[in-house]
Image (cartoon, rainbow, N blue to C red):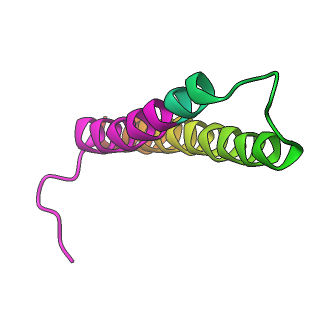
Amino acid sequence: MTINNLNFDYVGTTVANVIGTAESALKAKISTLDSATASPAELLLLQQDISKWAIMTEIQSTLVKTISDAMKGIIQKSG
């Protein structure tokens, strides 16, 4: 699979969209959860979803930093 316009903005927007969808689902789950009646199993599933979201944000940060560092390296070598 070839992506012709693979660039910083494309990667940032694509990953941000995925994280935004996950964040919306997480917020919806939190808003429907009743703290007075939530079972331990429901709380564990919520914790799992929060962990997934946190990992996604870490991946986004890593991707942005890696691309930024690669671009800086290219600019330094060309100048």
Image vertical order of residue 6 relative to residue 10, above or below = below
The residue at the point 31 percent across, 34 percent down is: 79
- Measuring 66% from the left and 29% from the top, which residue is drawn there? 33
**Looking at the rendering, which quadrant does residue 38 occupy?**
top right
Q: Is residue 20 magenta?
A: yes
Q: Quick one: quadrant of the N terminus? A: bottom left
Q: Position of residue 51 (x, y in %)?
A: 71, 43
Q: Which residues are magenta?
A: 1-25
The question of residue 60 being in magenta is answered with no
Left-right relation of 37 to 75: right
Residue ranking furthest to the bottom: 1
Q: Position of residue 58 (x, y in %)?
A: 62, 39
Q: Is residue 78 left or right of residue 40?
A: left
Q: Quadrant of residue 36?
A: top right
The outermost residue toward the front is 37
Camera-side residue of 32 and 68: 32
Q: Nearer the viewer, residue 8 or 54?
A: 54
> Nearest the camera: 12 or 74?
12
Q: How many marks?
A: 0
Residue at the farthest left position: 4
Which residue corresponds to the image point at 50% horizontal and 40% vertical from the top-left? 60
* 59 displayed left or right of 24: right
Q: What secondary structure prevails in the magenta region? A: helix
The vertical placement of 1 against 75, above or below, is below
Give x and y (percent) for residue 5: 13, 52
